[in-house]
C-alpha cells in the first residue's frame, strides 16, 4: 500500500533520476537577500541534485550569470537591495543570450499582483512564499521541461533532417549575419555544389541509396569546410558561405573536389563527382552572391560537369 505522500515522493525521485540521465547536472542560480529563504531554496535544489549558486540581489545575479553562461534556471526573490527581482528579469529578457533562461519569481508579498508583475517582466512562473515543497519541485521541473522542449524544436527548425546540415532557411540567416559583419577588408565567398547525374543513382540503385549518397556527401562537405557555414540548399544541392581569404578558400575547394573523386560510394564502387559554382568577394548582398554562384554552377554543368567555375 503506497500513501499519497509516498507516491509524490516516488514520482519526484523518478523525475530527478530522469533529468540526471538526460544531461549533466543542471546549474541553478538562487537570488535572495534573506539568508533563511535562500537556504531553504538552495537545500531543496541540492536534494534534487541541481548544482546551486546563490547571490544577494539582482546586480550580483547579472554578474554571476555573465561568469556562468551554463546556468539554466534562476529562482529570484522580489524585494532586494540594489536591483529587485522584477527589474532583474526585465534586464535579462532584453538580452538575446538570456531568452532561453528559465526564470521563476518568488515573493511573500500578498497583494496578488506580484505574480502578474513577474510574468509581465518575462518570468516563466511564480511561487508565493511560503510554498509547499511539492509545488516548488513540480513548478521547477515543469518550467525546465518546457524550455528543453522549446530548445529541441528551435534546433530542429534550423537543421535539415536527412543530413543534419543547416537547412535552407537557417543557411540564409547565418549567411546574412556573416554579410552584416563584413567590413570592406574581409573576404567573403559563396559556393554552390551539385551532385552530377544524381538522378541516375536514384533510378539505378533506388532512393534509399540515393539518400545515403546525399548523407555521405554532406558529411564530407562538413568535414572539409568545418570553419564555414555549410547548408543543404535543396535536394542534391549544397552551399558553403565562407569568410576565409580567397586563396585559402580556393585551395579548400580544390581539395574537396579531389576528396569527392576519391569517394567510391557503396559496394558497387560508384564513382561520384560534383560541379561547383563559386562567387568570390561579392560586391552586393547575399542573394546576389547566390545568384552569381548559381550562374557559375550552371556554366560548370554545361561545360561538362565535374569542374569548378570560375
Ligand atoms: P545534373 O548532373 O545536371 O545535376 O543531373 P542530376 O540528375 O543530378 O540533376 P536533376 O536535377 O535532374 O536531378 C536531381 C534529382 O535529385 C531529382 C530528385 O528526384 C533527386 N532528389 C532530390 N532530393 C532527394 C532526396 O532527398 N533523396 C533522394 N534520394 N533523391 C533526391
Ligand atoms: Mg527580499
Ligand atoms: Mg540539382
Ligand atoms: Mg545534380
Image (tube, helix red, strand yellow):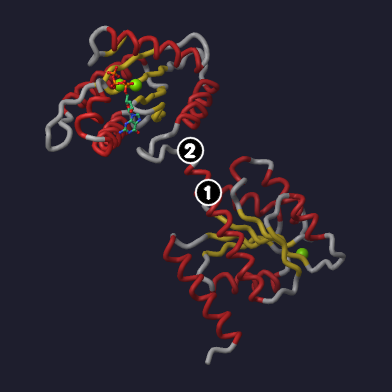
Q: Quadrant of the C terminus?
A: top left
Quarter of the view holding residue 73: bottom right
Q: Which mark is residue 176?
A: none
Q: Secondary structure at mark 1?
A: helix
Q: Residue placed at 58% from the left, 62% from the top?
A: 53
- Which residue is at the far left? 268
Q: Which mark is residue 151?
A: 1
Q: Foreground: 283 or 87?
A: 283
Question: In screen coordinates, is 174 left or right of 216?
Answer: right
Question: In screen coordinates, is 63 left or right of 189?
Answer: right
- Report x, y in % for residue 135: 66, 72
Does 102 sit above or below residue 299? below
Task: Indicate which quadrant contains ligand 4.
Answer: top left
Residue labelled with disc 2: 158
State whether residue 259 appears in this view. yes
Q: Secondary structure at mark 2?
A: loop
Q: Foreground: 271 or 226?
A: 271
Disc 1 Cβ-to-ligand 1 distance below 8 Å: no
Does 264 sit above or below residue 277? below
Q: Residue placed at 65% from the left, 76% from the top?
A: 133
Q: Residues within 10 Å of mark 2 (few under 14, many from 20)?
A: some
Q: Earlier in the sequence, mark 1 or mark 2?
A: 1
Amino acid at each position: 500500500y503506497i500513501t499519497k505522500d509516498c507516491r509524490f515522493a516516488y514520482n519526484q525521485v523518478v523525475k530527478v533520476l530522469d533529468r540526471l540521465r538526460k544531461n549533466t547536472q543542471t546549474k541553478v542560480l538562487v537570488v535572495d537577500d534573506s539568508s533563511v529563504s535562500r537556504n531553504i531554496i538552495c537545500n531543496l535544489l541540492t536534494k534534487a541534485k541541481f548544482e546551486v549558486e546563490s547571490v544577494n540581489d539582482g546586480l550580483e545575479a547579472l554578474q554571476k550569470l555573465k561568469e556562468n553562461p551554463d546556468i539554466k534556471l534562476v529562482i529570484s526573490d522580489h524585494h532586494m537591495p540594489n536591483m529587485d527581482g522584477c527589474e532583474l528579469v526585465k534586464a535579462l529578457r532584453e538580452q538575446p543570450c538570456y531568452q532561453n533562461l528559465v526564470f521563476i519569481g518568488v515573493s511573500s508579498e500578498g497583494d496578488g499582483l506580484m505574480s502578474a508583475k513577474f510574468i509581465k517582466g518575462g518570468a516563466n512562473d511564480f511561487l508565493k512564499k511560503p510554498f509547499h515543497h511539492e509545488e516548488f519541485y513540480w513548478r521547477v521541473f515543469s518550467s525546465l521541461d518546457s524550455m528543453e522542449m522549446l530548445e529541441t524544436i528551435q534546433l530542429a527548425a534550423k537543421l535539415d533532417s536527412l543530413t543534419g546540415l543547416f537547412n535552407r532557411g537557417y543557411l540564409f540567416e547565418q549567411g546574412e549575419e556573416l554579410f552584416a559583419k563584413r567590413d570592406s577588408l574581409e573576404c567573403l565567398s559563396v559556393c554552390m555544389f551539385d551532385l552530377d547525374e544524381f538522378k541516375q543513382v536514384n533510378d539505378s540503385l533506388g532512393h534509399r541509396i540515393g539518400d545515403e549518397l546525399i548523407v555521405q556527401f554532406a558529411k564530407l562537405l562538413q568535414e572539409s569546410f568545418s570553419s564555414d557555414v555549410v547548408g543543404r540548399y535543396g535536394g542534391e544541392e549544397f552551399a558553403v558561405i565562407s569568410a576565409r581569404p580567397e586563396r585559402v578558400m580556393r585551395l579548400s575547394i580544390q581539395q574537396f573536389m579531389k576528396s569527392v573523386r576519391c569517394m567510391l560510394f557503396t559496394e558497387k564502387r560508384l564513382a561520384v563527382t560534383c560541379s561547383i559554382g563559386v562567387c568570390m568577394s561579392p560586391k552586393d548582398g547575399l542573394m546576389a552572391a547566390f545568384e552569381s554562384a548559381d550562374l557559375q554552377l550552371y556554366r560548370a554543368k554545361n561545360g561538362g560537369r565535374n569542374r569548378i567555375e570560375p
